[in-house]
Amino acid sequence: MGRRALVSAGMPAAAFAVLLLALWFGGGRPRPAIEGLPSPGPLTTWGLPLVRLVHDLSAVATVGVLLTAVLLARDEDERRRIARAAAPWALVWAASAALTEVLTLSDFLGLPVGDALRSGVLTTFLYYIPQGQAFLLVTLVALTVAVGALLPLDAGGRALLLALAVFAVLPPAYAGHSASAADHNLAISSLMAHIAGVALWVGGLAGLVAFLPGSAGLPAAVRRFSALALCCFVAVGVSGTINAWVRLGEVSQLWESRYGLLVLAKAAALAALGWFGWRHRRATIAALETEGSRPFLRLATVEVAVMLATVGLAVGLSRTAPPASAGVPGVAQHQHDALGYTLPPYTPGRLVTEIRPDPIALLAVAGLVAAYLAGVRRLSARGEGWPAWRTASWLAGLLVLAYGLAGGVAAYGPAVFSIHAAQYALLGAVGPALLVLGAPLGLYRRAVPTAGEHEDGPWARALSLPWVATALYAAPYVALYLTGLFEAAQTSLAVRLGLQAVVVATAVVFLEVATGVDPLPRPIRPQVRAAMLLAGVAVQAWVALELLAGPLQGPGWYASLALPWGPERNGDQRLGALLGPGAAALTLAALLVLLLLRWRDARRRLSAGAVQAG
């Protein structure tokens, strides 16, 4: 066996060895069956953590291969070759997810695998139980990625596959201990951010080592990945700290419980990986130009081995029971169970003081801040200026989004409809308007010389069609208030986060097209832009009328909360109908005024130029 093959086999073997050690230490190892009590048997008790590790490693590999093809590879032929290599990994991922479903059912019922499959509850488990739903979704998406990787996709198609793969690593967050944490919304959200960061970081580095060791583009690929790796390191560290804090409850549990000691072991591994990153930045990346790739690849290979061992440790931790939570005294348990967190009685001041720190939202906002400021800095280094007011507008828009996603309105929005409406005005109008006035596309095209290569792609041209952008803007509101999605968004953290992301994204697309701040693939007349903004105002007027004249939204949800301090439902929905859509409509009207003023000034300049020419 060659050295390369030995190393390739040794790294996953180390992950399995660490898993077995963590199972032994944390108490997750199989126990002898007790006579008279149901037992799933050794196939399930040993097989479930081992298959779960295969699942996690293949998921990381799939994400890493696609990330390498999308972001790191140098030319189109190389990108297509690497993307095809994702197919077998995605198939293993799908198969291990399907096997995890079966073994989890066996563990869930306390029956051997054969008896569990003959019990007749597999369909119910897959469709109605969170663990079954999560891994069924993973199976389907992983199969989609496997098929897509074999197709001759362009850059946009490969990017879509990468997005699907990253999405598919998230559902298992609903199937672990975090789902039963004292603050399970925060625990799940932090775990989702943690898992996504790990998949991109570990998978990306493994992709560099596996596919680009002899490539002439390795130095440039390493520099691109280095920036992403630093972001992932921060995201993994912050989200992991939050998740551990929620699960442990007290700092003393770090050394008083086996779960806490395993958390400390993960923290030590993260610190070691931080040292690897520091060493790369200090020595090996610079040496790529002078000493070749050997120093970088040697250190990166050891780093990947430590990463895979840490994945094994994480799977072992997921099979270890966390310390029992004492709960929150004096708070109605049904309120806590429904919301996923405790909420004090509402006062206007608490919209300022109360926070719901969502790691996914805050990390995304931090990344957008860093990316924009990096673009401004790049222009400054070239001696080019960028309007300070545009930077201020971008930062203000992100501040609005951060408050809307993690501030007082995020805390009280699920409990009080009028605050929910105000939250969606911030996310769907105020924040996006400020972001668009920051001209992010213009900054990107000036800061990145090759950015214009893709500005006229089919996706960009389709999204810049006025009717498409307007339809996208209206769609979330129609779905939210006419299809029953409102109640689903309150009861499910995943649906709520997804809907909020869609509201922000569609509003940004709509306002980019409607305002004309940034250059677009197709010219759009000012009259059409004005009509788009008027259509946006009409959408908000329809939302207000639907809330004023239509049925109460989410009656079952608010009944399940049974808040003793909750407002009267009819009056609160009427207030929300005026407050949320009203603020959004005023924002769009202000943009319309700005558009008309710009149009007037442009006509005056054109007339003045014609007079001077004459």
Image (cartoon, rainbow, N blue to C red):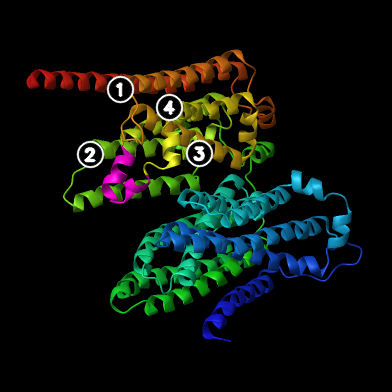
Residue at left offset 59%, top offset 45%: 185
Is 490 on the left or on the right of 439, as rendered?
right
Mark 4 surroundings: few (<14), some (14-19) or many (≥20) residues within 10 A: some
- Asked whether residue 441 is drawn in magenta, I would say yes
Query: Which residue is disc 3 drawn over?
Result: 501
Query: Between marks 4 and 3, how big is the CA–CA gap?
Result: 21 Å
> What residue sits right under mark 2 in the picture?
388
Percent position of residue 488, x then y = 65, 34
Assess disc 3: are there few (<14), some (14-19) or many (≥20) residues with their C-alpha within 10 Å of its C-alpha: some
Q: Secondary structure at mark 3?
A: helix
Image height check: is 472 above or below 59? above
Q: Which residue is mark 1?
A: 595
Report x, y in % for residue 320. 67, 64
Going by the picture, which residue comes out furthest to the bottom? 1
Check disc 4 and give the amino acid type.
Pro
View extreme (top): residue: 549
